[in-house]
Amino acid sequence: MARAGVTPERLAQAGAELADEVGFEHVTVSELARRFGVKVASLYSHVRSSHDLKTRIALLALEEMADRASDALAGRAGKEALAAFADAYRGYAREHPGRYAAARYRLDPQTAAASAGVRHAQMMRAILRGYDLPEPDGTHAVRMLGGVFHGYVELELSGGFAHTPVDPEESWAWIVDSLDALLRGRPAAASAT
Amino acid sequence: MARAGVTPERLAQAGAELADEVGFEHVTVSELARRFGVKVASLYSHVRSSHDLKTRIALLALEEMADRASDALAGRAGKEALAAFADAYRGYAREHPGRYAAARYRLDPQTAAASAGVRHAQMMRAILRGYDLPEPDGTHAVRMLGGVFHGYVELELSGGFAHTPVDPEESWAWIVDSLDALLRGRPAAASAT
DNA sequence: GCAGCAACCTAAAAGGTTTAGGAAAATGCC
DNA sequence: GGCATTTTCCTAAACCTTTTAGGTTGCTGC
């Protein structure tokens, strides 16, 4: 019998695709085995456990997001950088909801420290350098931006904005504007629309 | 054999406690049955399915959070109201991480519309009334606040702030300050510390 | 006191995770 | 090319969780 050519990398990749199709919480070793035309137990030669598999998918997603954000950031600074970063983040989540959920999978500290999550933090810091905040305000700002971006995207994805007839796109732009204004210490441009 | 006295309400309550102990994603009909000293199948006389059980826990959590927020809001307005609401939200999440996760369980539109989630939205609007924002800015603001609060709390809970030696409490206060300033159209009080 | 309705039970099917141990394909070394 | 080793995949089996079907039995109301 010919071999299926399973590797941890291909498993993570397929797992990421599966996550986008059915949701990260429904990604299962069994389903993946089915897709590779292989018996379930066989996958345990490539991943240690279901948790291991999910961790690999999470790392893949973090990497992809960081790459995307990095591209978006290239050559930009100030508000442009902030907006590009924000859009990269939100765009990824909308295109790849399953992967995005995977990126939020809880990693143990060691794995997290070696992940692309570190790059995310660095990029956030880089953006904030353009705003020239003294410490600890810089840290506060990192946390606030991380919070808004993640929180907004998650609320949007979970359908939380469906009941109000205001374009989420507009709200997003308004929020980025507001954050920029806030970080520059200037009043927000109230009703920009 | 004496009866265990299982009811949907007690199941939701016990489920909420279990969630806080082991995490919402590990709440299981089986474990609950074990805790009630009853066979698994018996619980299906009280809840339709695992999904039904989780929904009930979610509704319970939403209700508790709304009550708490409502208490915090009583008699306050403006920035005080904003801060009280924010603290109520974050406090609940920290004391009841499992319930908090439950509150984020995806409900179908009908259930959501009949849930305490509606009260959350109303309270948010009430707070914003003190800032006198024209539409659609009010909606944008609701979404931003929802995003920051949820996002910050989730990042904090998932240990995302552990690597920086800045007190999350301080960041939280800074963020609330900043949001207040932002909504009033005034520059934020830069380094308030 | 007993009819009827819940609340509980046993049994069993269907999936998912994981381990143990065996067969077969690929690899590398002579 | 031939053979030993490693790697990949398989069967088998244990153990969970979910869910349905159908049978008892305790409670409640008349």
Image (spheres, coloured by chain):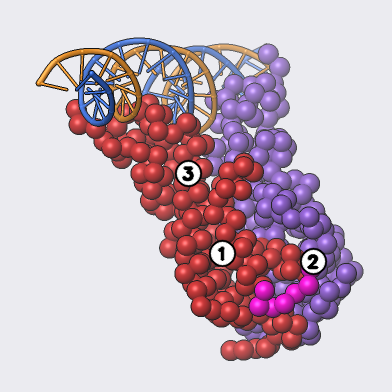
Chain colours: A red, B purple, C blue, D orange
Indicate the chain on which mark 3 is placed: A
Give the crowd class for mark 3: few <14, some 14-19, many >=20 residues within 10 Å.
many
Q: Is residue A132 magenta?
A: yes
For the residues tagged 3 and 2, is the chain the same? yes
Query: A52 above or below A60?
Result: above
Magenta region, main secondary structure: loop
Residue A40 belongs to magenta span: no
Q: Chain of mark 1?
A: A
Read off the residue under disc 3. A56
C-alpha span from label 1 to label 3: 22 Å
Amino acid type, label 2:
Pro
The spot of residue A64 in percent (x, y) is: 46, 58
How far apart marks 1 and 2 lie (CA) works out to 26 Å
**Can residue A101 be seen by looking at this rendering?**
no
Query: Tag 1: residue type?
Result: Val
Q: Residue at x 66, y 60 (%)?
A: B151
Among the two numbered marks 1 and 3 on one chain, the one whose residue lies closer to the N terminus: 3
Residue at (66%, 78%) from the top-left corner?
A130
Single out the mark in the foreground, 3 or 2. Answer: 2
Mark 1 vs mark 2, foreground winner is: 2
Residue A136: give its label: 2
The answer to whether residue A54 is left or right of residue A45 is right
Residue at x 67% of width, y 49% of height: B158
Image quadrant holding the N terminus of chain B, namely top right
From the image, tell me which residue sits under label 1. A153
**Quadrant in the picture for residue A107:** top right
Q: Are marks 1 and 3 on the same chain?
A: yes
Q: Which residues are magenta?
A: A129-135
Tell me the chain of label 2. A
